[in-house]
Amino acid sequence: MLETINSPEDLKKLSLDQVRDLAGQIRDLLIRTVAVTGGHLASNLGVVELTLALHRVFDSPRDKIIFDVGHQCYVHKLVTGRSGALGTLRQYGGLSGFPKRAESQHDCFETGHSSTSISAALGMALARDGNGDDYEVIAVIGDGSMTGGMAFEALNHAGHLGTKLIVVLNDNSMSISKNVGGLARHLGKLRTSPTYHRFKGDVEAALLRVPRIGPGLARWTRRIKDSVKHVFVPGTLFEALGFTYLGPIDGHDQALLEQVFAWARRLGGPVLVHVATRKGRGYQPAEENPDVFHGISPFDPETGTPLISEQTPTYSEVFGQAMVELAATHRHLVAITAAMTDGTGLLEFARRYPDRLYDVGIAEQHAVTLAAGLASAGIRPVVAVYATFLQRGYDQVLHDVCLQNLPVVFALDRAGLVGGDGATHHGLYDFAYLRHLPNITIMAPRDEQSLRQMLATALGLAGPVAVRYPRGRGPGAPLGPLETIEPGTGEVLRPGRHVSLIAIGTMVAHALGAADLLRARGIQAEVIDARFVKPLDARLITTSARRTGRVITIEEHVVPGGFGSAVAELLSDRGLLSSGVRLARLGIPDEVVEHGSNQSYFERFGLTPEGIARVAWDLMDRGGTSGETAAGQVLGE
């Protein structure tokens, strides 16, 4: 049946029984596809009926449907003409795992981080009103995303304005980890307390049976329903904000969903429809372990077992284990996470030290300032957060941490390229947005043991520190003691006299590979692990630059404002570029980097050992080619 669905209009031709059959077929296709491509499975399995109901009641693309975060949009893509391309999901050149305006007119707004949908939807609704149009605007937001402050800012503004807007609260009691906080408790009470709805139905049914006066009394009770709700429903938060509240309703009851959405469409002003769904619905492994199947690598669809079983730990796991060890000797050490206890490797820390872990929900701004408050009172907080998500707390990093020179450690997971999650999730900007802030120290490890050493070093520093490390598994370096390293010092891994390869983080291994290729051609490359982006090891870098006269910086980060820019500033300030030293900066170019394997982008941007060696050969050419590549630029011509 799915092969006959090329647009939402085709959905509207089906009977309810056919739609229910289609939901089963969609779940089967999602499981089989994500088992091969990897991706966000549990969240998509949970919104099948919800998405089908939205497209049967509303008229996309005229009506605008915005999915918060957007990782639950696979079903939406299937029914808007992209089912034939689902096998390319998250692959280089294929379908994005998030809404993408370039893919379809049905993707009206691009999302990737949480809590943005209501703000975007309100903007569209106001534009609609200003232009005299009459289409519907629907924001679909999860209860996890509702823990973000931006969602409440938008709800408050929308309720104040009173413009027509529909917010669908997809409540599965989870973000990636279990939701925390007062809102989670409030929604839990709503989900489990049908007292008001049962009371209202029973009273109306009884009144209607009273001869002559019954219907009038029933109408009167409907008029006072708000007063009744205040008595019987545990909280009226959304109505207090100015929304008409409908729910909670069963998010897997197709007929009921369509009835309630049709009702919401007829109402004026802002409406919130509270829908209760089950994450992983229809696939037992995902229902039992929704956090594991939130974002998963390829797996066996029959058993749910991952296909790749690596022996080496991930960087997240190395970080988590180091935190457990450090906590044993640093009694003031605490960890802070924004709804990512598992994703950042802190599960064991949480088990060992439950009173020293603070999960703040999807609230990065609060996480940073909470850490600042803790640090100001003598506690040593480590904020474990994906590099792309710390961007959301930038103002707090500057104002609340760096300006006060507070000893907060930012453990930036998933820095660099992150493969299939694409543009919104690549951690490519942290060097640039952090290194110009006062007082901060910035480090990046080349392997697992370096990460352990940097964490130990960070806890001994008196000011703010950022340690950034990549997604996935490292090269398998032996794990040794938690020794510290001298702040602001690099390390020469291989001496040389013809060209200096100064790398940071993951690119150190690529630089060593390039040095091997160059040695085969008689070129002696000096390989330096910079270790610190701020402060740079000025003595080591300038000494190497003077000796070789040719410097290549290599980083898994955008070139503008990154590590290479810091080295360029250093060499320029010391007069080395004007005196003949040639500098090539390799990294990610100034463009949007979409989804695709990391290796495909390393090859495209010249960040492989072969690509680095080509630039080095060019710098060795006295004929003076520019040395420019797609991902780098040469200074000091």
Image: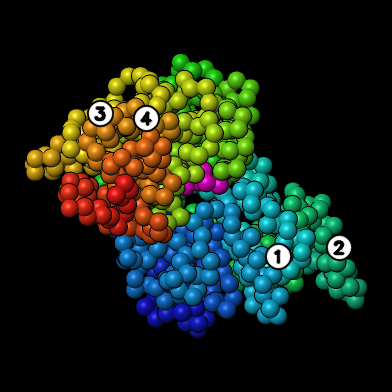
Q: Secondary structure at mark 3?
A: strand
Q: Is residue 388 magenta?
A: yes
Q: Position of residue 208 (x, y in %)?
A: 82, 71
Q: CA distance from mark 3 to mark 4?
A: 13 Å
**Neighbours of disc 1 within 10 Å: few (<14), some (14-19), many (20+):** many
Q: Residues within 10 Å of mark 4 (few under 14, many from 20)?
A: some
As measured in the structure, the alpha-carbon distance from the residue carrying label 2 to the one carrying label 3 is 77 Å
Residue named by callout 1: 271
Q: Amino acid at mark 2?
A: Ile
The disc, 4 or 1, on the residue closer to the chain's N-terminal end is 1
Instruction: Give the structural element (helix, strand or loop) at label 2.
Output: loop
Any mark on residue 224, and which? 2
Q: Looking at the picture, which amino acid does disc 3 mark?
A: Val
The residue that mark 3 highlights is 492
Q: For residue 132, what is the image quadrant?
A: bottom right
Residue with the mark numbered 4? 538
Q: Which of disc 1 and disc 2 is earlier in sequence?
A: 2
The magenta segment is 387-393
